Image (cartoon, helix red, strand yellow):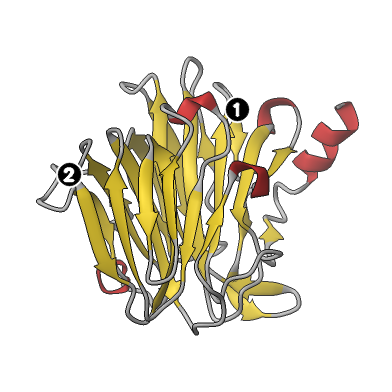
Amino acid sequence: MADLIVPTKTADSDGNVLSITPQSAGWEYIGFDIYSLKKGQKLKKNTENQEICIVILTGKSNVSTKEEKWENIGQRMDIFEKIPPYSVYVSNDDHYEVEAVTDLEIAVCAAPGKGTYPARLITPQDVGVEHRGAGNIARQVHNILPEQKPADSLLVVEVFTPEGNWSSYPPHKHDQDNLPHESYLEETYYHKVNPGHGFAIQRVYTDDQSLDETMIIKDGDAVLVPKGYHPVSAPPGYEVYYLNVMAGPVRTWKFNNSKDHEWIMEEKLALK
């Protein structure tokens, strides 16, 4: 059995409650951390050879880098308010300091950087809001750092799946370095469930079923997607959030739907 779930743990002295590194995941590109900071607590890190996207999941904060400072940024106090977040992009060979103005939860998304772009604030107005799918595969997408916006490696998006709906559906994959047909992208899913005692279901599988895992996901779990298809289901009574981070050798999202299931999207859209 593949070990693809990374659960939330008790906060360490920095406030870290979840950590994924390329070494722990067994891949090359993505690092991902969740920090839960109390009001007044500070977090300071060097970016080294990584570019960083700090997503303010809930709460308000002050964020500074070598050259920039933004004060009292953050808007939503609960993820399921479903409003786009504030985020901060930081290049490699820089540092960032986050000070919690209120209790704060942040995601720190990391991938190899080249120093191409300066640090910048990504406001809610900069985030593209998309309603994808139809019927029981409809979901709300917030494009935080899509490929149309500047970065060296990172792609960052968050998705809200209504109760009883499926997401990342039809099942799709991006595990072949075969452009222009498909790109190789590692991916993490960080899940939240509302109400928090609920659960989600995620399957990660390949065509040959050399990888085929169906997992019960709890509030605060992250899932590794090293390859294959990766659909998500929100059970009746529970809405599901996930934050996706993707990175690979080329910063483009070219995917292929499962040939067995791609007809479903056409049918749902026809009934819309």
162 horizontally vs 72: left or right = right
Q: Secondary structure at mark 1?
A: loop
Residue identifier under label 2 = 9
Residue 65 is labelled as none
Q: Nearer the viewer, residue 80 or 126?
A: 126
Q: Is residue 186 visible?
A: no
Residue 172, image quadrant? bottom right
Q: The disc labelled 1 sits on which kind of residue?
A: Asn
Residue 271 falls left or right of residue 42:
right
- Judging by the rendered image, the residue that carries numbered circle 1 is 165
Instruction: Give coordinates of residue 182: x percent, y percent.
Output: 68, 72
Q: Give the structural element (helix, strand or loop) at label 2.
A: loop
Where 76 falls versus 150 (above or below)?
A: above
**Quarter occupied by the N terminus:** bottom left
Please provide percent x and percent y for residue 264. 76, 39
Residue at 69% of width from left, 32% of height from top? 138
Q: Residue furthest top?
A: 237
Front residue of 5 and 62: 62
Cα gap from disc 1 to disc 2, whole angstroms: 28 Å
Location of residue 165 by image quarter: top right
Give the mark toward the camera: 1 or 2. Answer: 2
Position of 55 relative to 197 (above/below): below
